[in-house]
Amino acid sequence: MRAARWAERRRHSMDRPGTSEASWRGWPALREFPAVHLAGITSAVVIAAHPGDAVLSVGGTISMLAASGARVRMVSASTGDVADSGKRGTPWEWWGEVRHALQMLGADGVEIVQLRDSDGHGGGGGEPQAETLTRLCAGFDLCLAPWEGDRNPATEPV
């Protein structure tokens, strides 16, 4: 009983209602964004700092690319467990959630590449991360990566 009261006082923000779809659709600035056309894109690489970031940031784009038959590679710079030490679950469970999300998006054929393991060691055979990313993006039509002005320190290496 005591633990339940403690948990109720510390509800995670994801447990609370968010912005409704109607509010997002009614937002005037939404009409100012340019339309994204993916016609002719046959392959894309999505680079993110943590496993779920790619799905959260460009999940709709991943879904559209997969539906068009494009080859999609998702590169995660880490397992996410060092930066997200307060997160519930294990890296194994997080990857399961990512795979489930991709399946729900109709993109379960996405190739997943993990660049770094949980302790921060590179997975690129000893080469610098920039060279690894360059190699992983070679031959693809499109590369989606975090905005360089993003203030999140986790995205800085990517």
Image: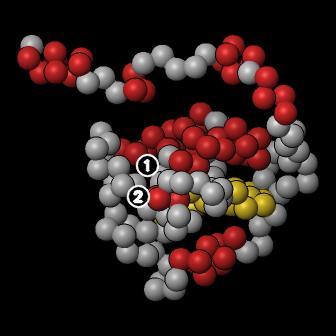
Instruction: List the residue tagged with mark 1.
Output: 95
Can residue 66 be seen from the camera position used here?
yes
The answer to whether the residues at label 1 and label 2 have Cβ atoms under 8 Å apart is yes
Image quarter in which the N terminus is found: top left
Mark 2: give few (<14), some (14-19) or many (20+) Cα within 10 Å: many
Classify residue 76 as left or right of residue 2.
right
Q: Position of residue 93 (x, y in %)?
A: 36, 44
Per the rendering, the mark at residue 144 is none
Q: Nearer the viewer, residue 97 or 119?
A: 119
Name the amino acid, label 1. Trp
Can residue 46 be seen from the camera position used here?
no
Is label 1 in a helix, a strand or a loop?
helix
Q: Nearer the viewer, residue 146 or 80?
A: 146
Q: Position of residue 9 (x, y in %)?
A: 23, 19
Mark 1 or mark 2, whichever is nearer to me: 2
Classify residue 74 as left or right of residue 89.
right
Residue 103 position by quadrant: top right
Residue in the image at 65% along x and 78% along y: 135
